[in-house]
Amino acid sequence: KQEVTQIPAALSVPEGENLVLNCSFTDSAIYNLQWFRQDPGKGLTSLLLIQSSQREQTSGRLNASLDKSSGRSTLYIAASQPGDSATYLCAVSRVDSNYQLIWGAGTKLIIKP
Amino acid sequence: DAGVIQSPRHEVTEMGQEVTLRCKPISGHNSLFWYRQTMMRGLELLIYFNNNVPIDDSGMPEDRFSAKMPNASFSTLKIQPSEPRDSAVYFCASSLTEYNEQFFGPGTRLTVL
């Protein structure tokens, strides 16, 4: 059974720092991995999607990597800003049912001005 | 595009009442998902539609829950009768195909008293 873990559950860093959020999964047979952010009281915003054949994806100050063999993904945020404060969730989709996302519990990120 | 649209944004009702949540997916997307989010259980997939046809409703908790998608631009999730344990945030999401990233609506926060 696929399980997705995000550690730490919460992270607080000063503005301007580069930081890494971690996501691990137990079964390497994934179709893709997606990173989302969720602001309090709001919906989820898709940040990056990495196909199982890819190693990384970049969007602006965000870079996501994928290592299927070790069951890990990282989300790198460069030059963090207070506006980056949110909960970040990762989700993996199953090979046998691509639409089925298995979710991590999220990392709550606070960027201090 | 306006993104995924959900209504109402907030719903407060009394136990036993019927609740109908509505969703308009992104135009051109053929996959639609209903999720429920609670603090205890995180995000749960309730039902998945592909080309307006329910493909997987294994996440629908009970017969009190039903979902329809009469056309490509509209879906409803109905709870009848509602119970306090149904209180949660309900999200609708759509994707171009089941293989693509999912885009979420702002959610409906349901409170059943």
Image: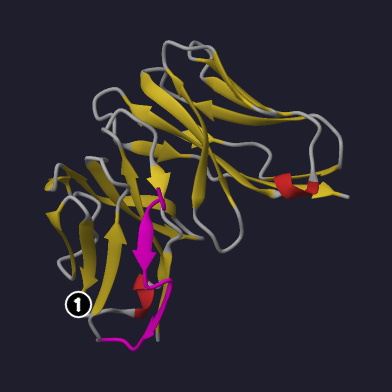
The residue shown at (25%, 40%) is B28
**In this orientation, does residue B38 appear?**
yes
Coloration mode: secondary structure
Image height check: is A4 above or below B86?
Answer: above
Q: How many marks?
A: 1
Work out whether residue A48 or residue A96 is closer to the camera in this orientation and state it: A48
**In this orientation, does residue A2 appear?**
no
Image height check: is B92 above or below A75?
Answer: below
The residue shown at (28%, 66%) is B22
Measured as percent of width and height from the top left, residue A34 is found at 47, 32
Quick one: which residue is furthest to the front in this view? Answer: B1
Q: Secondary structure at mark 1?
A: loop
**Crowd class of label 1 (few under 14; some 14 to 19; many from 20; radius 10 Å):** some
To which residue does mark 1 refer?
B80
Quarter holding residue A11: top right
**Residue A16 part of the magenta segment:** no
Name the amino acid type tagged 1.
Gln
The residue shown at (28%, 46%) is B27
**Residue B2 part of the magenta segment:** yes
Per the rendered image, the range of residues in magenta is: B1-16
The reply, left or right, for residue A76 in relation to residue B19 is right
Measured as percent of width and height from the top left, residue B16 is found at 25, 86
Measured as percent of width and height from the top left, residue A9 is found at 66, 45
Measured as percent of width and height from the top left, residue B93 is found at 35, 49
